[in-house]
Image: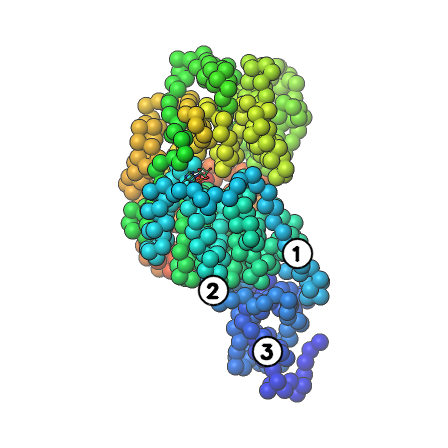
């Protein structure tokens, strides 16, 4: 209801600036002014009217008066979510920094940082939901407080307690990084401080959650990830915010978790690309924000990895991060031996060389287990006509469809389109054959070659839920499966003590990509997959099939390890002025017509040129490598600068102009600051 001016007793009114849940590009950039009959503290969650809707808001600041807004035009707060204590100043400051850095509105960032149910529930419904959170903390590990630390672990802990700089904990798989996290956590808990642990994907690191739970049976754990139902997520968030959780373990968005009395931040597997949100409008790096958060709150932070990102290694080299190394594997484990297997002189069996098959035979005979890594799922990358050159195109994408033999389907990995697997060429009627191999095909070939041997497969087609993952991991751990075939998923976190041989198929993909990060990702994958071998007493063996055994990247990796590879790769980045030696942002757009996309990007470019671009270079627009995806045309404009500050100064002026471009309404667009993938 509208309020008449004379009804407002301005002495009895509290004026507030409130950040509201407004859709992106709605033109609502900052907080809006509301009035309230009750005093409300900054950080308080409220429900407020917005247009005809009622939305969630966060009180951002209190005001003396209604400012520029005539008092009678201010709308009233509908209610406060009193069961939720106000979000503190550090939380608000992280949100504000994030909005500025990634050029999003405060409302969009604040609301993305809060559990979705808060947006939907009324204050009354919410009061009823606020009970009970329990994390799944099953684990086989026994408490190990008595274990003697290695000299490197001791040195790392000492360093971390005396040096306030953020640290990079660089140690191979099994070198004892988790043990360091656990010791650091113990110290914080003893000081009544809480710990935030960021992990790439919860489902893929179940052992980590289990180890924290077992080590700290008295502590309360909250686990925050996207696999939770909205109700579970709200409960875990609440236990974080109320202070009942001592240890908060979560994926990407947990970087915004409002942990009270936070004492330490840990980012495990810091190189993992899933720390970067790569979809939608708000694209952020949780790893980078964790560093910002720790710095602003004056907290110690540890980034751990066996294969650190080149960014972090560079930061360590320039002194922004303290580098701590754990070179030795603990216990009796030996580092695996890596060998390049030149496939050019080999006879091949559906992608597996004779030498690789003999290796598998040998390791099985010696009671070992074998891992076969291939970065393609499905039966085969595509289906080809033997006569006319037809290659199973997706009708909506510039891509081939993948063959699924068991499901008897063709599927597009880019748009999800499916159709029945044709028996003959739909174009000319001749016979068709599969081209290349995926996990399903490798599993089939191994089944034929090693009858009676248990084989498990791990890829996104097999793993739909966490339980599926547990089942596969259990079958390998119990020895029921002696060969494991899988994609990148196999590289993460699992510990299979009897695994003695790892075979890497089609490594060559990453060697000749147009993406400047492809080599880094390939090296990380090889090292991570190799790290699965020989974790117990038995030495591991790693065979990498390649047609390019002389490739300098593979050579540096094999001869000098990840460190040598990283040094060589950083040299290359330096001479090409790629990150971390420059800063990038990508303006990406898509529309049903290529023309529309390019017109928008061209207009954005011209708008940029009209501003003072300073030291920012605008490159493009250029169509994406796969321009048509799900029937939309994708293209991008790249921005490059030697300095972060000039890039941000430019973005601040430029983004508001883009928002007003007439062509902006005809495309979907997003600005990606520090993009991980260029297409
Ligand atoms: P990472 O996290 O680097 O993979 P972990 O901390 O999981 O390494 O250590 C690998 C294995 O070695 C674990 O089983 C762990 O309990 C054990 N471990 C860690 N530190 C020590 C140590 N100082 N002495 C003996 N065993 C250790
Ligand atoms: Zn044909
Ligand atoms: Zn498609």
Is ligand 1 within 8 Å of the beta carbon of the residue shown at mark 3? no
Q: Residue at x 56, y 36 (%)?
A: 414
Gap between marks 3 and 2 measured at Cα: 21 Å
Name the residue nearer the viewer: 480 or 223.
Answer: 480
Percent of width and height locating residue 118: 64, 60
The residue at the point 61 percent across, 85 percent down is 12
* Residue 314 in picture, x, y percent from top left: 32, 46
Please tell me whether mark 1 sits on a helix, a strand or a loop: loop
Q: Nearer the viewer, mark 2 or mark 1?
A: 1
User: For the residue labelled by badge 3, is the local secondary structure a helix, a strand or a loop?
Assistant: loop
> Residue 39: which numbered mark, if any?
3
Residue 568 screen position, x and y as percent: 30, 36
56 up-or-down from 5: above or below: above
Residue farthest to the front? 146
Count neighbours of disc 3 (C-alpha within 10 A) and say few if under 14, some if 14 to 19, many if 20 or more. few
Chain-order first, disc 3 or disc 2: 3
Q: Is residue 100 visible?
A: no
Quarter of the image with the C terminus in it: top left
Instruction: Tell me whether circle 3 and circle 2 mark residues in contact (CB < 8 Å).
Output: no
Q: In this rendering, does residue 146 appear at all? A: yes
Q: Residue at x 63, y 22 (%)?
A: 405
Residue picked out by circle 1: 132
Q: Is residue 395 left or right of residue 339?
A: right
- Residue holding disc 2: 90
Instruction: State the residue in front, 72 or 319.
Output: 319
């Amino acid at each position: 209801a509208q309020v008449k001016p004379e009804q407002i007793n301005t002495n009895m009114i509290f004026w507030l600036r409130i950040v509201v849940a407004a859709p992106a590009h709605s033109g609502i950039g900052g907080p809006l002014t509301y009035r309230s009959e009750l005093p409300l503290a900054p950080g308080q969650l409220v429900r407020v009217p917005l247009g005809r809707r009622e939305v969630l808001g966060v009180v951002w600041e209190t005001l003396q008066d209604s400012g520029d807004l005539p008092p009678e035009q201010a709308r009233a707060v509908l209610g406060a979510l009193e069961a939720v204590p106000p979000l503190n100043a550090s939380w608000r400051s992280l949100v504000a920094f994030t909005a500025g850095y990634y050029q999003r509105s405060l409302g969009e960032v604040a609301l993305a940082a809060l559990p979705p149910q808060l947006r939907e529930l009324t204050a009354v419904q919410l009061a009823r939901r606020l009970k009970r959170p329990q994390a799944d903390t099953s684990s086989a590990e026994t408490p190990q407080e008595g274990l003697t630390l290695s000299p490197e672990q001791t040195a790392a802990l000492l360093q971390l307690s005396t040096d306030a700089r953020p640290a990079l904990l660089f140690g191979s798989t099994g070198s004892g990084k988790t043990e360091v996290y656990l010791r650091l956590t113990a110290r914080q808990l003893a000081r009544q401080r809480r710990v935030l642990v960021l992990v790439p994907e919860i489902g893929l690191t179940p052992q980590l959650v289990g180890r924290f739970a077992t080590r700290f049976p008295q502590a309360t754990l909250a686990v925050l990830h996207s696999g939770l139902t909205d109700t579970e997520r709200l409960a875990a968030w609440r236990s974080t915010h109320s202070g009942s959780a001592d240890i908060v373990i979560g994926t990407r968005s947990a970087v915004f978790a409002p942990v009270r009395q936070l004492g330490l931040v840990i980012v495990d597997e810091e190189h993992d690309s899933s720390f970067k949100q790569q979809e939608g409008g708000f694209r952020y790096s949780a790893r980078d924000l964790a560093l910002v958060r720790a710095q602003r709150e004056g907290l110690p932070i540890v980034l751990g990895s066996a294969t650190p990102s080149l960014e972090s290694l560079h930061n360590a080299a320039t002194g922004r991060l303290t580098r701590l190394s754990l070179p030795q594997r603990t216990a009796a484990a030996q580092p695996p031996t890596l060998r390049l297997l030149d496939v050019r002189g080999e006879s091949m069996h559906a992608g597996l060389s004779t030498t690789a098959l003999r290796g598998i035979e040998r390791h099985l005979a010696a009671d070992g287990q074998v891992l076969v890594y291939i970065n393609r799922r499905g039966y085969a990358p595509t289906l080809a006509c033997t006569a006319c050159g037809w290659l199973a195109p997706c009708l909506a994408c510039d891509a081939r469809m993948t063959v699924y033999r068991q499901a008897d389907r063709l599927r597009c990995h880019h748009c999800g389109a499916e159709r029945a697997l044709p028996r003959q060429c739909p174009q000319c009627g001749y016979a068709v054959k599969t081209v290349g191999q995926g996990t399903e095909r490798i599993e089939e070939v191994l089944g034929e070659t090693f009858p009676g041997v248990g084989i498990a497969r791990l890829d996104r087609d097999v793993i739909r839920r966490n339980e599926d993952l547990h089942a596969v991991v259990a079958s390998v751990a119990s020895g029921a499966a002696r060969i494991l075939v899988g994609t990148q998923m196999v590289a993460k976190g699992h510990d299979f003590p009897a695994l003695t041989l790892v075979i890497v198929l089609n490594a060559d993909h990453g060697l000749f990509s147009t993406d400047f990060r492809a080599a880094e990702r390939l090296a990380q994958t090889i090292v991570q997959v190799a790290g699965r071998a020989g974790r117990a007493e038995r030495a591991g063996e790693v065979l990498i099939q390649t047609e390019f055994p002389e490739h300098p990247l593979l050579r540096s990796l094999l001869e000098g390890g990840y460190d040598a590879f990283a040094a060589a790769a950083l040299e290359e980045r330096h001479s090409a002025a790629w990150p971390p030696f420059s800063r990038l942002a990508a303006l990406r757009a898509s529309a049903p017509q290529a023309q529309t996309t390019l017109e928008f990007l061209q207009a954005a470019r011209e708008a940029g040129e009209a501003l003072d671009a300073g030291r920012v270079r605008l490159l493009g627009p250029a169509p994406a490598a796969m321009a048509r995806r799900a029937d939309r045309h994708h293209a991008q404009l790249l921005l490059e600068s030697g300095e972060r500050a000039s890039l941000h100064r430019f973005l601040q002026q430029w983004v508001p102009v883009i928002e007003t471009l007439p062509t902006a309404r005809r495309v979907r667009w997003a600005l990606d600051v520090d993009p991980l993938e260029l297409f």
